[in-house]
Image (tube, helix red, strand yellow):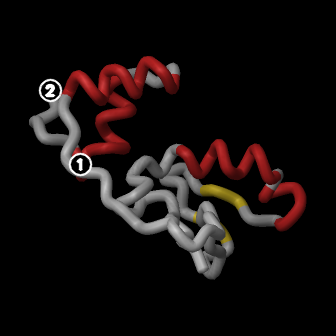
């Protein structure tokens, strides 16, 4: 019982969090799973997810987000705004500059 949301899916749309996961679990060093420049996993048969084993956990989707939210998120991640916007482009509710 539980859920297993993965980076890039509706409840965790930011693929860049995969880098954080890789560092935390030492995926490359311990399992030989690498991330490409576009954050695809290699070998291609690899999978990743956050696992929440609780009977009341449920999936959700992050909706469209505004520029103020992206600016705040980019600031907290210490990421340049254009880069953050590129990674989050499918859920932006505005056109990028």
The image shows residue 1 at horizontal and vertical percentages of 60, 80
State which quadrant residue 49 falls in: bottom right
For the residue pair 5 and 40, the one nearer the viewer reads as 5
Q: In this view, does 2 lie above or below 78?
A: below
Q: In this view, does 25 lie above or below 80?
A: below
Residue at the limit of the structure toward the right, as seen here: 30
Q: Earlier in the sequence, mark 2 or mark 1?
A: 1
Residue at 18%, 32% (x, y): give it: 66
The image shows residue 85 at horizontal and vertical percentages of 30, 35
Residue at 22%, 39% (x, y): give it: 65
Left or right: 42, with 39 as reference point: right
Res 91 label: 1
Instruction: Tell me the quarter of the image containing the C terminus.
Output: top left
Residue at 89%, 61% (x, y): give it: 30
Residue at 31%, 21% (x, y): give it: 71
For the residue pair 9 and 3, the one nearer the viewer reads as 3
Q: How far apart are marks 2 and 1 (CA)?
A: 15 Å
Q: Is residue 94 above or below residue 32?
A: above
The image shows residue 89 at horizontal and vertical percentages of 25, 45
Res 97 label: 2
């Amino acid at each position: 019982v539980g859920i297993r949301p993965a980076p890039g899916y509706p409840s965790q749309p930011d693929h860049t969090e995969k880098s954080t996961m890789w560092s935390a679990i030492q995926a490359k060093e311990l399992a030989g799973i690498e991330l490409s420049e576009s954050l695809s996993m290699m070998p291609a048969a690899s999978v990743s997810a956050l696992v929440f084993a609780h009977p009341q956990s449920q999936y959700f989707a992050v909706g469209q987000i505004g520029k103020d939210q992206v600016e705040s998120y980019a600031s907290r991640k210490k990421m340049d705004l254009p880069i953050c916007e590129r990674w989050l482009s499918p859920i932006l509710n505005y056109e990028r500059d």
